Amino acid sequence: MTNPTIRDVAREASVSVASASRAMNGHPNVTASTRQRVLDAARRLNYMPHSGARSLTMRHSNTIGVVLPDLFGEFFSEIIRGIDGAARRRGFQLLLAHHDCATETAAAIQAMRGRVDGLLVMSPHIDTNFLATNLPRGLPVVVMNSRAGSAGYTSLSIDSFTGALAMVEYLVDQGFRRIAHISGPKGNRDAEERLRGFRQAMGDLLGDKDPLIIAGDFSEESGREAGRILAADKLPVDAVFAANDVMAVGCMFALIDAGVSVPADIAVAGFDDIPIARYVTPGLTTMQVHIAELGTLALETLVDAIADPGAPAKAARMLTPELVVRQSTGKPR
């Protein structure tokens, strides 16, 4: 047997197709008795509304587009976990895409045109001009951790600069003086802000205008390479602050493999507080971002914008990370 259609439901309920459609879609211009008759007929026929056809009628897809720079790793899995949980609670599905450059970001946004009710976009490659050029007119959007957090776009960002200041201040208070930084990839807003905060804190607190910077790219391997450099060259370093936890964990393992004691010889700290940070040995001192909560807040903010499309974009919101002290930085010196 073929799947029943709305015409079959209308015939079973002895109403017009238009009345059956209005009853199924919850339209107020339907009497209670007619609505019940239609619902009873749909139940008898085991009728399931076609989501695509319904979205065309109601001009909603109940789908949120999510464009991220990556879908791999604990940071992004936590972001997606927060977004997905909030979306399911609000009755939305997700359409995910990731990108490596501005061209891919634009292609992902264009591919979602007409298929989503709103967009969550996180990208180090975008700015206000990029969004103005590539976003469908009138489509609600929330940008996360990008340079597009102004000029009419609602944005949520991590205050990476303040977080880096706080981490260096903590390390200095612990007695560390020769602090190195493993930086993130060039062009990444969070990496640049954490590097800027590190440099300023080192200059303000220790008078060190040229601190040791080891280039990284947010990957575990770049952290391991930084650890191997520190161990092999026996650089005069007593603490390392990595721009994310993944690099910090990689660095810590490389140091331990080389016979360097963490934290007795070199302390290690990171940024983000990904789940594994609390389970490695020693536990990793880090700046806690509440990653899943960031995803939840972004989704809730976007759903509010979808519900009230005429409302102006909300002011840029900065989320301040919190210091979490664990064993990788040891006892106060």
Image (cartoon, rainbow, N blue to C red):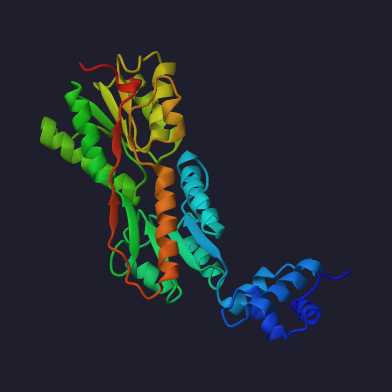
Q: Nearer the viewer, residue 49 or 332?
A: 49
> Going by the image, does 227 lie left or right of 22?
left
Q: Residue 117 location, x and y as percent?
A: 51, 68
Quadrant where the N terminus sits is bottom right
Q: Quadrant of residue 226?
A: top left
- Give me the residue at 29% from left, 55% from top: 317
Query: Is 6 on the left or on the right of 210, as rendered?
Result: right
> Viewer-proximal residue, 125 or 143?
143
**Residue under the point 34% across and 63% down:** 154
Residue 64 in the figure: left or right of residue 191: right
Find residue 197 and report its horizontal and vertical position in percent: 22, 42
Where 321 falls versus 250 (above or below)? below
Residue 118 position (above or below residue 281): below
Q: Nearer the viewer, residue 64 or 45?
A: 45
79 w.r.t. 226: above or below: below
**Residue under the image location 21 percent in, 38 percent down:** 165
Regarding residue 106, the answer to whether it shows in the image is no
The image quarter containing residue 308 is: bottom left
Q: Taking 77 as reference, is 241 above or below it?
A: above
In this view of the protein, can residue 264 be seen by the observer? yes
Instruction: Give residue 89's position: percent from left, percent from top.
Output: 52, 54
Quarter of the figure with residue 152: bottom left
Q: Residue furthest right?
A: 1
* Count of picture labels: 0
Looking at the rendering, in which quadrant would you find the C terminus?
top left
Q: Position of residue 22 (x, y in %)?
A: 63, 80
